[in-house]
Image (spheres, rainbow, N blue to C red):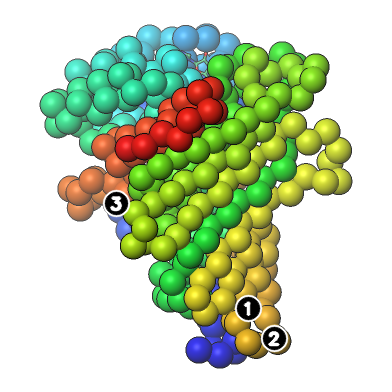
Amino acid sequence: MTMSSIELRPEDYQPRPPAKKDYRIGVIGCGGILNGAHLPAYQKFGYRVVACTDISEEAVRRTRERWGIPAGSTDIRCVLENPDVDVVDLAVHANQRLPVIEKIAAARKPVLSQKPFAMNWKDATTMVDLCEKAGVKLMINQQARWAPAHRAAKLLVSRGVIGHVYSVMHVNRSFQDRAGSWFVALENFNIIDHGIHYIDLSRYFTGRNPLRIKATTTRMPGQNAVSPMIFTILLEYEPSAQVMTTLHFNNIIQVPKLRSYDWYLDGTHGSIAVNQSELTVQFKDQPEYQVFQIQGTWFPDAFGGSMGEMMQALAENREPETSGRDNLNSVRIAYAAVESSETGKTVEF
Ligand SMILES: NC(=O)c1ccc[n+]([C@@H]2O[C@H](COP(=O)([O-])OP(=O)(O)OC[C@H]3O[C@@H](n4cnc5c(N)ncnc54)[C@H](O)[C@@H]3O)[C@@H](O)[C@H]2O)c1
């Protein structure tokens, strides 16, 4: 392959609404992410939101007014017993999820649940079993898989452009140590809640689940967060896979100039580096390289992509790509990373 033969067209990697997009959405949990990403994406993609609920009356009122949602109440039945609702979009926190999923399963409505799916293994497996037993389709909103930059990189990898990928590395330098936010109050937020995106993306890029996990974390003196905001997680696979993953996430970078977000995928024929706006690819033994500007953004476009996948799965009566059962693989890695960082031991599956 030559550099000039690489094609990367936005229409190949940008999330798009599915052919049948008239499923009517009912939302549970009208907080920050619902108003900041879900609903802007649904408006952009032409999806219909017909009802919303939250335990806060003010949150329901504000959300209905802003997005012109026809029905809304603090009574969850306005979504779950509403015959107009075809699919539930669940955006409460993970530690509030189990009792809500019990009600959704009893109402037999398909559900797209925000990540992280659960804060512990028992809740995660209980919710997957509950939905399966009730015949309810459950998808976890690992929408980073639909972010244009991540999809573009995955597309080139799947086409074999860089050959066998033997190393996947993520370096993320960000800042979420904000006093008063829910992030800093949530135990193991950086690994289990935010970090689950990068753990899930490691599965997306490698197409594999690891055999061994080793993690280390630290705290910044005087930090606000109750748990470490810095981690390095190493993922080892079966030897024949000949690949390793390194995830480094420092979420307490105090200087904006030195924050960054990069993935490096190294293959036998060449390497790809991708951030949210640019993808660079170069082949071994060739001086030239190519830089593609990524069209579209993770927030909010990817949220239209994940809901689109849910609708497509409903239309085709199949499991969605990031089903609850599939997501058990991602949350298991996150819990193992916490265990490893606390015990200093490698966790083996
Ligand atoms: N990229 C992403 O995917 C992304 C980004 C941010 C947050 N999140 C996830 O989304 C979830 C919510 O985060 P947020 O920032 O919107 O939080 P938030 O606190 O702003 O909103 C949560 C909302 O849920 C409501 N709520 C709580 N219990 C409820 C119940 N039983 N029934 C109905 N409503 C209930 C709260 O009143 C609140 O309005 C978290 O799991 C978080 O990790 C995901």
User: Which of the marked residues, 3 or 1, is nearer the chain's N terminus?
Assistant: 1
The answer to whether one can see residue 187 in this image is: yes
> What secondary structure is found at the residue carrying circle 1?
strand
Ligand 1: does it lie within 8 Å of the C-beta at label 1? no
Task: Residue type at mark 3: give it.
Answer: Gln
Please give the label number shown on residue 288.
2
Q: Position of residue 261 (x, y in %)?
A: 68, 50
Q: Rounded to the nearest whole Å, what is the CA distance between mark 2 and mark 1?
A: 7 Å
User: Which of the marked residues, 3 or 2, is nearer the chain's N terminus?
Assistant: 2
Q: Is residue 105 left or right of residue 100?
A: left
Q: Rounded to the nearest whole Å, what is the CA distance between mark 3 and mark 1?
A: 35 Å
Q: Rounded to the nearest whole Å, what is the CA distance between mark 3 and mark 2?
A: 40 Å
Q: Position of residue 142 (x, y in %)?
A: 44, 41
Name the quarter where the C terminus is drawn: top left
Note whether 277 is above or below 210 in the view shown. below
Residue ID for mark 1: 282
Q: Which residue is drawn at 45% across and 39% down?
A: 213
Could you classify mark 1 by the number of other residues whose Cα lies within 10 Å: few (under 14), some (14-19), or many (20 or more)? many
Task: Residue type at mark 2: give it.
Answer: Glu
Residue ID for mark 3: 312
Ligand 1: does it lie within 8 Å of the C-beta at label 2? no
Which is more foreground, mark 3 or mark 1? 1
Q: Is residue 268 left or right of residue 298?
A: left
Q: Residue at x 56, y 76 (%)?
A: 270
Task: Residue type at mark 1: give it.
Answer: Gln
Q: Residue at x 56, y 17 (%)?
A: 187
The answer to whether one can see residue 22 in this image is: no
Q: Which residue is drawn at 40% across and 29% down?
A: 117
> What secondary structure is found at the residue carrying circle 2?
loop
